[in-house]
């Protein structure tokens, strides 16, 4: 893989049911649009101020404001982490826990690191043995997502804290919690105990702000200072700042959406059981399901206006597609299309 290749380009889809990128299928809170409309000409003319939104995120997640870095989507946070924590001149190794989100390896390579994968067990669960084997004395950083994308499994928080403590002070652990809103788990409460721990959150998924590009990284104040040295000072724009504060304030919209996803996920899994399809139990807003001829099923679903992600080329995911879980009505439409194409 070349160094600069950051993401598999996906076909543009502007109609139909988008179940291929784990977006919020309902949309963001209406309060977000109102807040964006209130942004003034003067605010647009000025470089953005982040204090208020940073404090809102810190309160929301239970950390200090000096433990928060707002980023232009969590993708920018991932690249920033790699650039800040892989030392130039002596880059060493970055360990990526598989199956992995597509940004980890390319970001680490851009930072100059040697990327080594810690492969999953054959059932795609976390392999402690493969993880230990991938570590080296010159490992700078370990990257993983919890819940995992695309398998949807959760590594217990206690295990992750053990991993961070075992890595010791000079090797960092990045836990990508892009889907933690759906699962309800988090290692944020252990940040103070583990100075080498970083947590990533995004407002793209549960909060429906993927198009706004807003995420954050949480870590110790010292690590946050290091990250600031590797990111442009105004990478988050004024609309994103206004949107974020409004989204955090609308707890009811979030709770409603999380309940929809729980119900829709149960509906989808019951349909997979009925159709005899095997799937990975997921704590997130997507389910990886084995359909056999995944490219054909993906194309046939797309022909019916339902867009899903073919993951069959990912390690351990042969024959599988990943379907986003959104509102219950979207799950019903998806199952109806799936029954036709199978
Ligand atoms: C979607 C996703 C991200 C990216 O989030 P953005 O805020 O949209 O950049 C990061 N990590 C994982 C695991 C994701 O699935």
Image (spheres, rainbow, N blue to C red):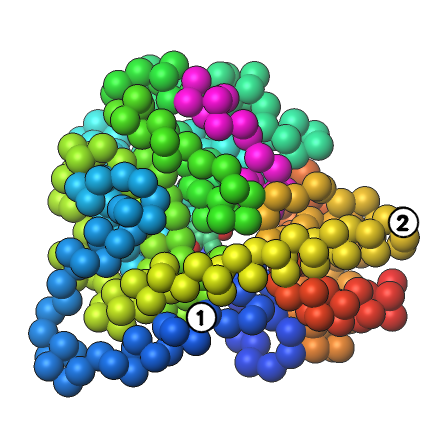
**Residue beneath disc 1:** 29
Q: Nearer the viewer, residue 106 or 72?
A: 72
Per the image, label 2 sits on a secondary structure element best described as loop
Q: Residue at x 70, y 56 (%)?
A: 263
Residue 98 sits in quarter:
top right
* Relative vertical location of residue 319 with respect to residue 189 in this rendering, above or below: below
Q: Is mark 2 within 8 Å of ligand 1?
A: no
Does residue 100 appear in this view? no
Verify whether residue 160 appears in magenta.
yes
Q: Is mark 1 within 8 Å of ligand 1?
A: no
Q: Residue at x 56, y 17 (%)?
A: 129
**Residue beneath disc 2:** 276
Does residue 327 appear in this view? yes
Q: Nearer the viewer, residue 317 or 16?
A: 16
Name the quadrant of the C terminus: bottom right
Residue interval drawn in magenta: 147-162
Q: For the view shown, which residue lies furthest in the front direction?
A: 252
Residue 76 spot, x, y in % from top left: 31, 53
Residue 68 sits in quarter:
top left
Task: Determine which of the numbered discs, if any, sits on residue 61 in the image.
Answer: none
């Amino acid at each position: 893989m070349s160094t600069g290749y950051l993401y598999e380009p996906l076909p543009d889809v502007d109609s139909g049911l988008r179940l291929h990128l784990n977006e919020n299928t309902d949309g963001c809170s209406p309060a977000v649009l109102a807040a964006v409309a209130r942004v003034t000409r003067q605010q647009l003319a000025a470089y953005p101020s982040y204090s208020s939104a940073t404090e809102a995120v810190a309160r929301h997640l239970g950390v200090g404001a000096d433990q928060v870095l707002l980023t232009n989507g969590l993708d920018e946070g991932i690249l920033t982490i790699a650039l800040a924590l892989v030392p130039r001149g002596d880059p060493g190794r970055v360990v990526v826990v598989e199956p992995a989100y597509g940004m980890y390896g390319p970001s680490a390579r851009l930072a100059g690191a040697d990327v080594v994968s810690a492969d999953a067990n054959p059932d795609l669960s976390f392999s402690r043995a493969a993880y230990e084997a991938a570590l080296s004395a010159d490992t700078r950083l370990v990257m993983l997502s919890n819940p995992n994308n695309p398998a949807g499994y959760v590594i217990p928080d206690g295990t992750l804290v053990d991993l961070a403590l075992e890595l010791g002070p000079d090797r960092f652990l990045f836990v990508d919690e892009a889907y933690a809103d759906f699962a309800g788990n988090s290692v944020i409460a252990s940040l103070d105990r583990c100075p080498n721990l970083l947590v990533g959150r995004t407002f793209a998924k549960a909060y429906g702000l993927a198009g706004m590009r807003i995420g954050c990284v949480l870590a110790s104040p010292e690590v946050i200072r290091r990250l600031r040295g590797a990111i442009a000072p105004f990478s988050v724009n004024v609309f994103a700042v206004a949107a974020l504060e409004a989204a955090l304030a609308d707890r009811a919209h979030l709770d409603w959406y999380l309940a929809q996803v729980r119900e829709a996920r149960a509906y989808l899994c019951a349909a997979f059981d009925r159709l005899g399809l095997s799937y990975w139990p997921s704590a997130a807003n997507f389910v990886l399901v084995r359909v056999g001829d995944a490219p054909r099923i993906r194309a046939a679903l797309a022909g019916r206006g339902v867009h899903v992600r073919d993951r069959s080329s990912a390690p351990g995911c042969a024959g599988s597609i990943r379907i986003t879980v959104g509102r219950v009505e979207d799950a019903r439409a998806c199952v109806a299309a799936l029954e036709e194409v199978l």
